[in-house]
Image: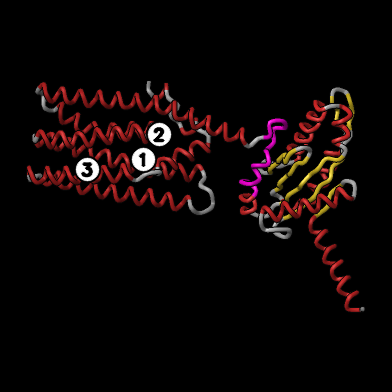
Amino acid sequence: MFFNRMESGRASISDPVYMEVITGLHGTTMPTVLAAACQAMVGAITTYETGDMVTAGLSVAGVVVAIVRLFEIFAFRRRLAYPPQLGRAEAVLWERRYVAGTVATALVLGVFAARSIVLGDALCSVMAIGIGFGFGAGVVARLALRPVAALLDLVAIAAPAAIVTFMQPDLRHVGLGLLILMYVVASFEMVRLSFNASINQITLKRQFEQLSRLDPMTGVSNRSVLATDLPQMLAAGMIAVHTLDLDRFKEANDRFGHPVGDALLKQVAGRLKALAAQDDLVVRMGGDEFVLVQRAAADAEAMAQRIVQSISAPYDIDGQMIELGVSVGVAVAPDDGRTAEALLSRSDKALYRAKQERGGYVLARDLRMADASASGQILAEELAA
Protein backbone atom coordinates (compact mmCIF):
# COMPACT_ATOMS: atom_id res chain seq x y z
CA MET A 1 0.00 0.00 0.00
CA PHE A 2 2.84 2.36 0.85
CA PHE A 3 4.57 1.74 -2.48
CA ASN A 4 1.35 2.22 -4.45
CA ARG A 5 0.97 5.71 -2.96
CA MET A 6 4.59 6.70 -3.43
CA GLU A 7 6.64 7.43 -6.52
CA SER A 8 9.49 5.22 -5.37
CA GLY A 9 10.79 3.87 -8.65
CA ARG A 10 13.96 5.26 -10.21
CA ALA A 11 12.12 5.69 -13.51
CA SER A 12 9.85 8.33 -11.95
CA ILE A 13 12.84 10.67 -11.41
CA SER A 14 14.58 12.45 -14.29
CA ASP A 15 18.30 11.91 -14.80
CA PRO A 16 19.43 15.35 -13.51
CA VAL A 17 17.25 14.99 -10.40
CA TYR A 18 18.52 11.45 -9.81
CA MET A 19 22.16 12.60 -10.08
CA GLU A 20 21.47 15.34 -7.55
CA VAL A 21 19.90 12.79 -5.20
CA ILE A 22 22.89 10.41 -5.38
CA THR A 23 25.35 13.26 -4.92
CA GLY A 24 23.38 14.40 -1.88
CA LEU A 25 23.57 10.95 -0.30
CA HIS A 26 27.36 11.16 -0.40
CA GLY A 27 27.39 14.77 0.76
CA THR A 28 28.33 14.21 4.41
CA THR A 29 30.33 11.76 6.52
CA MET A 30 29.16 13.05 9.90
CA PRO A 31 26.22 10.60 10.45
CA THR A 32 28.51 7.65 9.73
CA VAL A 33 31.22 8.88 12.06
CA LEU A 34 28.79 9.74 14.86
CA ALA A 35 26.96 6.39 14.68
CA ALA A 36 30.26 4.50 14.91
CA ALA A 37 31.53 6.70 17.76
CA CYS A 38 28.31 6.33 19.76
CA GLN A 39 28.20 2.56 19.28
CA ALA A 40 31.87 2.23 20.27
CA MET A 41 31.28 4.26 23.43
CA VAL A 42 28.11 2.44 24.47
CA GLY A 43 29.67 -0.89 23.53
CA ALA A 44 32.71 -0.19 25.69
CA ILE A 45 30.52 0.76 28.66
CA THR A 46 28.25 -2.27 28.24
CA THR A 47 31.22 -4.64 27.87
CA TYR A 48 32.83 -3.17 30.98
CA GLU A 49 29.63 -3.45 33.02
CA THR A 50 28.50 -6.89 31.83
CA GLY A 51 31.63 -8.53 30.45
CA ASP A 52 29.66 -9.54 27.33
CA MET A 53 32.05 -10.24 24.43
CA VAL A 54 29.21 -10.39 21.88
CA THR A 55 28.58 -6.72 22.54
CA ALA A 56 32.29 -6.03 22.10
CA GLY A 57 32.28 -7.87 18.78
CA LEU A 58 29.24 -5.95 17.57
CA SER A 59 30.94 -2.67 18.51
CA VAL A 60 34.02 -3.61 16.48
CA ALA A 61 31.78 -4.63 13.56
CA GLY A 62 30.07 -1.25 13.69
CA VAL A 63 33.38 0.58 13.49
CA VAL A 64 34.59 -1.60 10.59
CA VAL A 65 31.39 -0.99 8.62
CA ALA A 66 31.73 2.74 9.24
CA ILE A 67 35.31 2.74 7.92
CA VAL A 68 34.23 0.87 4.76
CA ARG A 69 31.39 3.36 4.25
CA LEU A 70 33.75 6.31 4.62
CA PHE A 71 36.02 4.86 1.95
CA GLU A 72 33.00 4.47 -0.34
CA ILE A 73 31.91 8.09 0.19
CA PHE A 74 35.40 9.44 -0.50
CA ALA A 75 35.72 7.22 -3.59
CA PHE A 76 32.48 8.64 -4.95
CA ARG A 77 33.70 12.19 -4.42
CA ARG A 78 36.95 11.40 -6.23
CA ARG A 79 34.96 9.91 -9.10
CA LEU A 80 32.97 13.14 -9.50
CA ALA A 81 36.20 15.10 -9.82
CA TYR A 82 37.30 13.31 -13.02
CA PRO A 83 35.72 12.94 -16.48
CA PRO A 84 33.73 11.51 -18.05
CA GLN A 85 30.61 12.83 -16.39
CA LEU A 86 28.82 10.35 -14.14
CA GLY A 87 26.06 8.56 -16.05
CA ARG A 88 22.84 7.19 -14.66
CA ALA A 89 23.85 3.52 -14.95
CA GLU A 90 27.04 4.16 -12.98
CA ALA A 91 25.15 6.29 -10.45
CA VAL A 92 22.82 3.33 -9.80
CA LEU A 93 25.85 1.21 -8.84
CA TRP A 94 27.07 3.89 -6.45
CA GLU A 95 23.60 4.09 -4.92
CA ARG A 96 23.52 0.34 -4.36
CA ARG A 97 26.88 0.46 -2.60
CA TYR A 98 25.70 3.30 -0.40
CA VAL A 99 22.44 1.52 0.45
CA ALA A 100 24.31 -1.72 1.23
CA GLY A 101 26.46 0.24 3.67
CA THR A 102 23.52 1.88 5.41
CA VAL A 103 21.65 -1.43 5.71
CA ALA A 104 24.75 -3.07 7.18
CA THR A 105 25.07 -0.25 9.70
CA ALA A 106 21.38 -0.46 10.57
CA LEU A 107 21.53 -4.24 11.04
CA VAL A 108 24.57 -4.02 13.32
CA LEU A 109 22.84 -1.33 15.41
CA GLY A 110 19.64 -3.37 15.51
CA VAL A 111 21.42 -6.51 16.74
CA PHE A 112 23.41 -4.36 19.16
CA ALA A 113 20.18 -3.02 20.68
CA ALA A 114 18.65 -6.49 20.81
CA ARG A 115 21.70 -7.86 22.62
CA SER A 116 21.52 -5.07 25.20
CA ILE A 117 17.87 -6.01 25.90
CA VAL A 118 18.85 -9.65 26.38
CA LEU A 119 21.57 -8.67 28.85
CA GLY A 120 18.96 -6.97 31.02
CA ASP A 121 20.96 -3.90 31.99
CA ALA A 122 18.32 -1.17 31.83
CA LEU A 123 20.65 1.80 31.36
CA CYS A 124 22.76 0.07 28.71
CA SER A 125 19.55 -0.95 26.90
CA VAL A 126 18.32 2.65 26.91
CA MET A 127 21.61 3.84 25.42
CA ALA A 128 21.70 1.13 22.75
CA ILE A 129 18.07 1.63 21.73
CA GLY A 130 18.65 5.39 21.74
CA ILE A 131 21.45 4.98 19.20
CA GLY A 132 19.11 2.95 17.00
CA PHE A 133 16.34 5.52 17.25
CA GLY A 134 18.82 8.33 16.50
CA PHE A 135 20.11 6.49 13.44
CA GLY A 136 16.51 5.92 12.35
CA ALA A 137 15.81 9.64 12.58
CA GLY A 138 18.85 10.25 10.41
CA VAL A 139 17.55 7.71 7.90
CA VAL A 140 14.30 9.66 7.65
CA ALA A 141 16.24 12.84 6.92
CA ARG A 142 18.93 11.43 4.60
CA LEU A 143 17.15 8.66 2.71
CA ALA A 144 13.72 10.20 2.21
CA LEU A 145 14.55 10.46 -1.50
CA ARG A 146 15.33 6.73 -1.65
CA PRO A 147 12.32 5.36 0.28
CA VAL A 148 12.99 1.67 -0.41
CA ALA A 149 16.45 2.03 1.15
CA ALA A 150 14.92 3.92 4.07
CA LEU A 151 12.43 1.12 4.71
CA LEU A 152 15.19 -1.51 4.61
CA ASP A 153 17.20 0.50 7.15
CA LEU A 154 14.26 1.01 9.47
CA VAL A 155 13.36 -2.67 9.38
CA ALA A 156 17.00 -3.68 9.94
CA ILE A 157 17.21 -1.41 13.00
CA ALA A 158 13.88 -2.40 14.52
CA ALA A 159 13.41 -6.07 13.68
CA PRO A 160 16.08 -7.62 15.97
CA ALA A 161 15.02 -5.58 19.01
CA ALA A 162 11.30 -6.16 18.33
CA ILE A 163 11.81 -9.92 17.99
CA VAL A 164 13.72 -10.08 21.26
CA THR A 165 11.10 -8.10 23.15
CA PHE A 166 8.19 -10.20 21.87
CA MET A 167 10.06 -13.37 22.85
CA GLN A 168 9.76 -12.17 26.48
CA PRO A 169 6.00 -12.19 27.13
CA ASP A 170 5.90 -9.81 30.09
CA LEU A 171 3.95 -6.61 29.64
CA ARG A 172 6.94 -4.28 29.72
CA HIS A 173 8.77 -6.05 26.91
CA VAL A 174 5.61 -6.35 24.80
CA GLY A 175 5.00 -2.61 25.27
CA LEU A 176 8.58 -1.86 24.22
CA GLY A 177 8.18 -4.04 21.14
CA LEU A 178 4.97 -2.25 20.17
CA LEU A 179 6.65 1.14 20.62
CA ILE A 180 9.48 0.04 18.32
CA LEU A 181 7.00 -1.08 15.65
CA MET A 182 5.01 2.15 15.90
CA TYR A 183 8.27 4.07 15.56
CA VAL A 184 8.99 2.26 12.28
CA VAL A 185 5.50 2.93 10.91
CA ALA A 186 5.61 6.62 11.87
CA SER A 187 9.12 6.99 10.48
CA PHE A 188 8.21 5.49 7.15
CA GLU A 189 5.16 7.72 6.86
CA MET A 190 7.51 10.69 7.37
CA VAL A 191 9.77 9.26 4.65
CA ARG A 192 6.83 9.04 2.24
CA LEU A 193 5.72 12.62 2.87
CA SER A 194 9.26 13.97 2.71
CA PHE A 195 9.93 12.05 -0.50
CA ASN A 196 6.99 13.57 -2.35
CA ALA A 197 7.76 17.09 -1.08
CA SER A 198 11.48 16.85 -1.87
CA ILE A 199 11.01 15.45 -5.38
CA ASN A 200 8.54 18.21 -6.19
CA GLN A 201 10.97 20.80 -4.86
CA ILE A 202 13.96 19.44 -6.81
CA THR A 203 11.88 19.11 -9.98
CA LEU A 204 10.69 22.71 -9.69
CA LYS A 205 14.27 23.83 -9.12
CA ARG A 206 15.36 22.04 -12.29
CA GLN A 207 12.48 23.53 -14.24
CA PHE A 208 13.37 27.05 -13.11
CA GLU A 209 17.02 26.42 -14.02
CA GLN A 210 15.95 25.23 -17.45
CA LEU A 211 13.71 28.26 -17.97
CA SER A 212 16.58 30.55 -17.05
CA ARG A 213 18.55 29.03 -19.93
CA LEU A 214 15.89 29.68 -22.57
CA ASP A 215 15.20 32.68 -24.75
CA PRO A 216 11.54 33.39 -23.95
CA MET A 217 10.64 34.56 -27.47
CA THR A 218 12.14 31.83 -29.64
CA GLY A 219 12.41 28.89 -27.24
CA VAL A 220 16.08 28.23 -28.06
CA SER A 221 18.88 28.68 -25.54
CA ASN A 222 19.92 32.16 -24.48
CA ARG A 223 23.47 33.50 -24.57
CA SER A 224 24.18 32.58 -20.94
CA VAL A 225 24.21 28.92 -22.00
CA LEU A 226 27.32 29.46 -24.13
CA ALA A 227 29.36 30.27 -21.03
CA THR A 228 28.62 26.84 -19.52
CA ASP A 229 27.88 24.48 -22.42
CA LEU A 230 30.37 25.61 -25.08
CA PRO A 231 33.50 24.82 -22.98
CA GLN A 232 32.02 21.39 -22.15
CA MET A 233 31.27 20.66 -25.80
CA LEU A 234 34.76 21.83 -26.74
CA ALA A 235 36.34 19.54 -24.14
CA ALA A 236 34.39 16.59 -25.55
CA GLY A 237 35.94 16.89 -29.02
CA MET A 238 35.93 18.69 -32.37
CA ILE A 239 33.11 21.23 -32.83
CA ALA A 240 32.11 23.99 -35.23
CA VAL A 241 30.69 27.37 -34.21
CA HIS A 242 28.36 29.04 -36.71
CA THR A 243 27.64 32.70 -35.86
CA LEU A 244 24.64 34.05 -37.80
CA ASP A 245 23.32 37.53 -38.43
CA LEU A 246 20.10 38.10 -40.38
CA ASP A 247 20.22 40.39 -43.38
CA ARG A 248 17.37 42.82 -44.11
CA PHE A 249 15.69 41.94 -40.82
CA LYS A 250 15.66 45.57 -39.61
CA GLU A 251 13.94 46.69 -42.82
CA ALA A 252 11.27 43.98 -42.44
CA ASN A 253 10.80 44.83 -38.76
CA ASP A 254 10.42 48.56 -39.52
CA ARG A 255 8.09 47.95 -42.47
CA PHE A 256 5.75 45.32 -41.03
CA GLY A 257 6.04 46.05 -37.28
CA HIS A 258 7.43 44.32 -34.22
CA PRO A 259 4.85 41.48 -34.08
CA VAL A 260 5.91 40.39 -37.56
CA GLY A 261 9.55 40.78 -36.55
CA ASP A 262 9.00 38.55 -33.54
CA ALA A 263 7.26 35.97 -35.73
CA LEU A 264 10.22 36.03 -38.11
CA LEU A 265 12.68 35.39 -35.28
CA LYS A 266 10.58 32.46 -34.08
CA GLN A 267 10.56 30.92 -37.55
CA VAL A 268 14.31 31.46 -37.93
CA ALA A 269 14.87 29.70 -34.60
CA GLY A 270 12.59 26.87 -35.72
CA ARG A 271 14.54 26.38 -38.93
CA LEU A 272 17.84 26.34 -37.06
CA LYS A 273 16.50 23.73 -34.62
CA ALA A 274 15.35 21.64 -37.58
CA LEU A 275 18.88 21.78 -39.05
CA ALA A 276 20.65 21.05 -35.76
CA ALA A 277 21.33 17.52 -34.58
CA GLN A 278 20.01 16.37 -31.22
CA ASP A 279 23.27 17.11 -29.40
CA ASP A 280 23.93 20.43 -31.20
CA LEU A 281 23.28 23.76 -29.50
CA VAL A 282 21.18 26.63 -30.90
CA VAL A 283 21.51 29.98 -29.11
CA ARG A 284 19.90 33.36 -29.66
CA MET A 285 22.54 35.91 -28.77
CA GLY A 286 20.11 38.82 -28.91
CA GLY A 287 18.38 40.86 -31.60
CA ASP A 288 18.68 39.00 -34.91
CA GLU A 289 21.95 37.20 -34.08
CA PHE A 290 22.12 33.45 -33.45
CA VAL A 291 24.82 30.86 -32.83
CA LEU A 292 24.68 27.19 -33.79
CA VAL A 293 27.30 24.94 -32.19
CA GLN A 294 27.73 21.78 -34.24
CA ARG A 295 29.33 18.63 -32.87
CA ALA A 296 29.86 17.02 -36.30
CA ALA A 297 32.52 19.58 -37.20
CA ALA A 298 33.71 17.60 -40.22
CA ASP A 299 30.41 18.62 -41.85
CA ALA A 300 30.83 22.30 -40.95
CA GLU A 301 30.89 23.76 -44.46
CA ALA A 302 27.91 21.65 -45.56
CA MET A 303 26.02 22.83 -42.47
CA ALA A 304 26.85 26.47 -43.32
CA GLN A 305 25.45 25.91 -46.80
CA ARG A 306 22.27 24.40 -45.38
CA ILE A 307 21.89 27.33 -42.96
CA VAL A 308 22.17 29.89 -45.77
CA GLN A 309 19.72 27.96 -47.95
CA SER A 310 17.17 27.42 -45.17
CA ILE A 311 17.25 30.89 -43.60
CA SER A 312 17.15 32.61 -47.00
CA ALA A 313 13.96 30.79 -48.05
CA PRO A 314 10.78 33.00 -47.98
CA TYR A 315 8.76 33.35 -44.77
CA ASP A 316 4.97 33.31 -44.69
CA ILE A 317 3.76 35.63 -41.89
CA ASP A 318 -0.04 35.93 -41.90
CA GLY A 319 -0.13 35.55 -45.67
CA GLN A 320 2.66 38.07 -46.20
CA MET A 321 5.74 36.61 -47.96
CA ILE A 322 8.96 38.05 -46.56
CA GLU A 323 12.50 37.28 -47.67
CA LEU A 324 15.57 37.63 -45.51
CA GLY A 325 19.22 36.93 -46.06
CA VAL A 326 21.80 35.60 -43.65
CA SER A 327 25.52 36.01 -43.07
CA VAL A 328 27.38 33.17 -41.39
CA GLY A 329 30.86 33.00 -39.88
CA VAL A 330 32.23 29.52 -39.19
CA ALA A 331 35.07 28.58 -36.82
CA VAL A 332 36.14 24.97 -36.27
CA ALA A 333 38.01 23.66 -33.25
CA PRO A 334 40.83 23.02 -32.76
CA ASP A 335 42.23 24.59 -35.95
CA ASP A 336 40.53 27.95 -35.42
CA GLY A 337 40.83 28.00 -31.64
CA ARG A 338 41.12 25.76 -28.62
CA THR A 339 39.01 27.85 -26.26
CA ALA A 340 35.41 29.01 -26.37
CA GLU A 341 36.53 32.65 -26.46
CA ALA A 342 38.88 32.06 -29.40
CA LEU A 343 36.23 30.20 -31.40
CA LEU A 344 33.61 32.89 -30.87
CA SER A 345 36.11 35.60 -31.77
CA ARG A 346 37.17 33.84 -34.99
CA SER A 347 33.58 33.11 -36.01
CA ASP A 348 32.67 36.78 -35.37
CA LYS A 349 35.53 37.90 -37.65
CA ALA A 350 34.35 35.49 -40.34
CA LEU A 351 30.80 36.78 -39.90
CA TYR A 352 31.99 40.35 -40.37
CA ARG A 353 33.67 39.36 -43.64
CA ALA A 354 30.49 37.56 -44.77
CA LYS A 355 28.46 40.72 -44.11
CA GLN A 356 30.97 42.73 -46.14
CA GLU A 357 30.39 40.30 -48.96
CA ARG A 358 26.61 40.83 -48.58
CA GLY A 359 25.60 37.46 -47.25
CA GLY A 360 26.55 33.82 -47.50
CA TYR A 361 29.11 32.12 -45.30
CA VAL A 362 32.82 32.59 -44.64
CA LEU A 363 35.10 30.04 -43.00
CA ALA A 364 37.59 31.27 -40.43
CA ARG A 365 40.23 29.02 -41.98
CA ASP A 366 39.89 30.89 -45.28
CA LEU A 367 40.50 34.16 -43.45
CA ARG A 368 43.62 32.70 -41.85
CA MET A 369 44.92 31.50 -45.21
CA ALA A 370 44.18 34.86 -46.81
CA ASP A 371 45.93 36.70 -43.96
CA ALA A 372 48.93 34.39 -44.21
CA SER A 373 49.10 34.89 -47.96
CA ALA A 374 48.85 38.67 -47.61
CA SER A 375 51.57 38.67 -44.94
CA GLY A 376 53.80 36.59 -47.17
CA GLN A 377 53.25 38.92 -50.10
CA ILE A 378 54.04 42.00 -47.99
CA LEU A 379 57.21 40.33 -46.69
CA ALA A 380 58.28 39.44 -50.22
CA GLU A 381 57.73 43.00 -51.41
CA GLU A 382 59.77 44.37 -48.49
CA LEU A 383 62.63 41.98 -49.25
CA ALA A 384 62.52 42.87 -52.95
CA ALA A 385 62.67 46.55 -52.11
| Tag 2–tag 1 contact (CB < 8 Å) | yes
- 47 shown above or below 133: below
Instruction: Give the residue pinned by disc 3.
Output: 38
User: Mark 3 against mark 2, which lies toward the viewer?
Assistant: 3
The residue positioned 10% from the left and 44% from the top of the image is 52
The residue positioned 25% from the left and 45% from the top of the image is 36
How far apart marks 2 and 1 lie (CA) works out to 9 Å
Quarter of the image containing the N terminus? top left
| 235 left or right, relative to 268 | left
Instruction: Give the residue pinned by disc 1.
Output: 99
Q: Residues within 10 Å of mark 1 (few under 14, many from 20)?
A: many
Instruction: Give the residue pinned by disc 2.
Output: 146
Amino acid type at image mark 2: Arg
Task: Tell me the SS state at disc 1.
Answer: helix
User: Mark 1 against mark 3, which lies toward the viewer?
Assistant: 3
Residue at the extreme bottom of the image, as rendered: 384
Q: Earlier in the sequence, mark 1 or mark 3?
A: 3
Amino acid type at image mark 1: Val
Residue 225 lies in the magenta-colored region: yes
